[in-house]
Amino acid sequence: MNKRVHFLCNGVYTSKVGGGDIHMIHLARAALAHGYKVNFFGGHALQRQLEGQLSGHTLTLTDRRALPTFDDSAVGGQLRMFIDYTKRLSGTLKQLPLIESGDVAYAVGDFWYDVVPLVRSRAGGKMLVYHMRAPTFKQIAVRGRADVDPTRIASLHYATSQTYSLRRFRRVPHKRILHVHPEMRDQLLRLGFQPNELRYVSFGVEPRRPSGNITKVFDVIWIGRKHRQKGVEDLLQTLATLKERIPGFRAVLIGNLQRDLQSDVDRLGLGSTVEFAGFVSEDEKFRLLETSRVFLMPSRFEGSPRAIAEALVSEVPVVAYDVPTYRPLFADFVRYVPCFSVADFTRETEAQVNAARAGDNYLRMLDLEAFRKTNSWSTVEETFCQALDELSGSLKRT
């Protein structure tokens, strides 16, 4: 008898692939390899994402068309997204009878447009992944966390949705909740989840190793987008200072950044120092990491940043602000500096660049193999499939 899992993915509205989308695709691929039939509930944007990324699955479309390109950071854009989410939720609810009692349903996030159909479905087993803690309502009111937007609309939506989702899912029988940060466990237990219902699962990373004798081209590398959460201003100030202190200093920035940052780069006299790589493939990203000496993480808030792990498995030292979420994940693999001291950040970066130029790398003294194993995609996929088997093992199928 065939086992079937439904991935509820109504949050995808663009063809751009984010970290959560990568996580979802890996888990779906693992479920297929493990003998499950995999069906997605999602829109046309999801359909475009899956093309070329996954085969052997089915897709239940929940909208009529994908949204055209728009500014999702503006209030009007956020309203358009909310309406679009609502349409996909409606499209899912109309087709919810496709999920049978012998199936497992998996919400790929903790937003209402996936959790409402999850809890209302007939699936005998239900799963939800908890990627990142939303800001508290107090943090939203005083903008006490760097990812709170000036209008607070998106943050209020996020916090309200997550609060509802976790409380509603807590009452569901025969469930598993995957959490991607170890400190989430205590919070979930306080909310009333049982220990046997919780599974820690890493953000996932390719367990790569540097390929042979590599020539270092760039002193520092950064991956991101322009957002107050990402500490771009601190990054640029660091680059400007290091250009004056380190002869021949070079930096590479990955992401769709040139349009937003070129004027700042020119103003700071960094035109000959900074290279914009743009969006790159996974292979090119790792090539650029391997040809760089130090990875910079000046973010003012992150949940479980895969970018740090990608730098570490590439054996690239990391300098980061000591934000609370990092140490439980990365321990001594990162060189932390006080939040948010640009002077300390710059000083530590300079020390690591000079050490790398001299052939020294603190990561050689640490157990990177254990880190690779704990956070590898194979470990993530195994954990997911074990949870699927636990839920589906006792379900009756027709």
Image: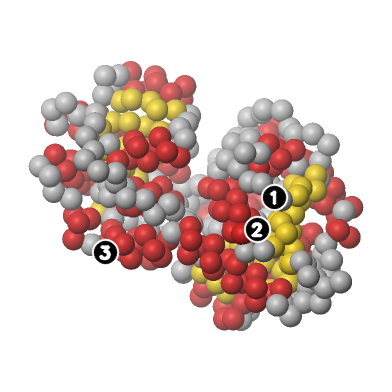
**Total tally of numbered discs in the picture:** 3
* Amino acid at pointer 2: Leu
Q: Disc 2 designates what residue?
A: 32
Where in the figure is residue 141, as x and y percent of width and height? Answer: 56, 52
Report whether 245 appears left or right of 154: left
Q: Residues within 10 Å of mark 3 (few under 14, many from 20)?
A: few
Residue in front for this viewpoint, 50 or 129 = 50
Q: Which one is closest to the eye, mark 3 or mark 1?
A: 1
Reply above or below: 239 against 368.
above
Q: Residue 338's x, y, as percent?
A: 27, 53
Disc 3 marks which residue? 367
User: Marks 3 and 1, how far apart in space?
Assistant: 37 Å
Looking at the rendered structure, the secondary structure element under dot 3 is loop
Measured Cα–Cα span from mark 1 to mark 2: 7 Å
What kind of residue is marked 3? Asp
What's the colour scheme?
Answer: secondary structure
Q: Quadrant of the C terminus?
A: bottom right
Measure how far apart labels 3 and 2 are at the Cα level: 32 Å
The kind of secondary structure element at disc 1 is: loop
* Residue under the point 46% across and 47% down: 146
Q: Mark 3 or mark 1, which has the lower sequence index? A: 1
The residue under label 1 is 56
Mark 3 or 2: in front is 2
Residue 393 image point, x, y percent: 70, 77
Q: Amino acid at mark 1?
A: Gly
Horizontal arrangement in the rendering, residue 170 relative to residue 226 (left or right): right
Q: Is residue 341 visible?
A: no
